[in-house]
Image (spheres, grey):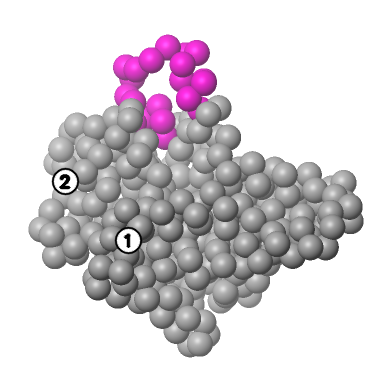
Amino acid sequence: MFGQFFVLFGLMAVGYVCSRKKFLNNEMTVGVGNIVLFFTIPALLFTSLANTKVERDMLINFATVAGLQFISMLMFGRIIRLYYRFRKFNENHLNMLEVTAVSVNNAFIGFPIAMMFFGEEAVVYMSASVLGLNLYLWSVGLYIIKGVQGESVGTMVKTIVKGAINPNISSILLGLFASVIGLMAYIPDFVQEFIRSLGSVSTPLSLIYIGALTGNSGLRYLMKDRESLEASLIKMIVMPLFAFAFIFFIPVEPMVKTVYFIAMSLPSAAIVPMIVGRYGTGVEVSSKMVMLTTAFSMATVPVCITISRIWM
């Protein structure tokens, strides 16, 4: 396991050093993130699912992970909101804090960890976690961020549909469809090799991107914001504890427990500040939480990976 952690943090360190040395500025880092989001992760998702023989048990586990992810985000969001209110955080930020805290970066960090530590089956279930995340963000999460006020029901539905139709979700559905009908048997080998090659760079690019994101953020500046700092620490400590207690007694397969627990221990999703910036208030604090939780995850996620071994 030491070797896997070395690779994980080594790739993040490359991104961090590149950002500090100005090899990667903010614009370049965004560009790397877009390559990962729109090309390499969808390719990884498609090949992982399309080349997996999806049977009844796997479909049940897939739906279980997605459902557990959605339900847990809903429950934990309500709980952590009470804490933020008790601590007298800015009342106008409570909606944003709830959704930012409960979101997880299972695309940029979850997939690399699943592939490196647990294999392709874990990638399949991590994609179910992505599905659960998107279902939450573009339904309950969007409603919370916007508050009771907002646009008409029709406009809200259009927003949810538009947000749900993204490269990750499309790749998940297409990969499942390809697996069920045996589509890969009809795709030329050179096309399959291209898709596999594109997906194979997802792990290093994702981790380099996360490292660069942390390096560009200026951690000393972030540490001065008490609200963001406390909110981030609570998210990265309490949420994994909640997830462990929640999943421990649920009778599901070990891989389902493992992927769910790892997913719930991840830092806040980078997409949330974009949603907050368009539909809510507190985008600066939300962005700081993404950066801080990403930095804190370098200490908390390895601990959670080690704990998850009790199920494997």
Residue name at image x 46 percent, y 51 percent: 34
Which mark lies nearer to you, 2 or 1? 1
Depth check, front residue: 84 or 228: 228
Query: How many residues crowd mark 2 within 10 Å: few (<14), some (14–19), many (20+)?
Result: few
Of label 2 and label 1, which has the lower sequence position?
Answer: 2
Q: Is residue 138 visible?
A: yes
Residue name at image x 22 percent, y 37 percent: 282
Residue 43, position in %: x, y? 64, 56
Q: Is residue 154 magenta?
A: yes
Residue 277 appears left or right of 246: left
Residue name at image x 53 percent, y 29 percent: 162
Residue 255, position in %: x, y? 65, 65
What segment is highlighted magenta in the picture? 141-160
Q: Is residue 254 above or below residue 64?
A: below
| Image disc number at residue 126 | none
Depth check, front residue: 269 or 210: 210
Element type at mark 2: loop
Depth check, front residue: 295 or 194: 194
Residue name at image x 14 percent, y 41 percent: 88
Q: Quadrant of residue 267?
A: bottom left
Q: Is residue 300 visible?
A: no
- The residue singled out by tag 2 in the image is 87
Residue 293 appears left or right of 261: left
- The residue singled out by tag 1 in the image is 213
Residue 150, position in %: x, y? 34, 17
Query: How many residues crowd mark 1 within 10 Å: few (<14), some (14–19), many (20+)?
Result: many
Distance, label 2 to label 1, CA atoms, is: 29 Å
Q: Are marks 2 and 1 in contact (CB under 8 Å)?
A: no
Q: Amino acid at mark 1?
A: Leu
Q: Quadrant of residue 9?
A: bottom left
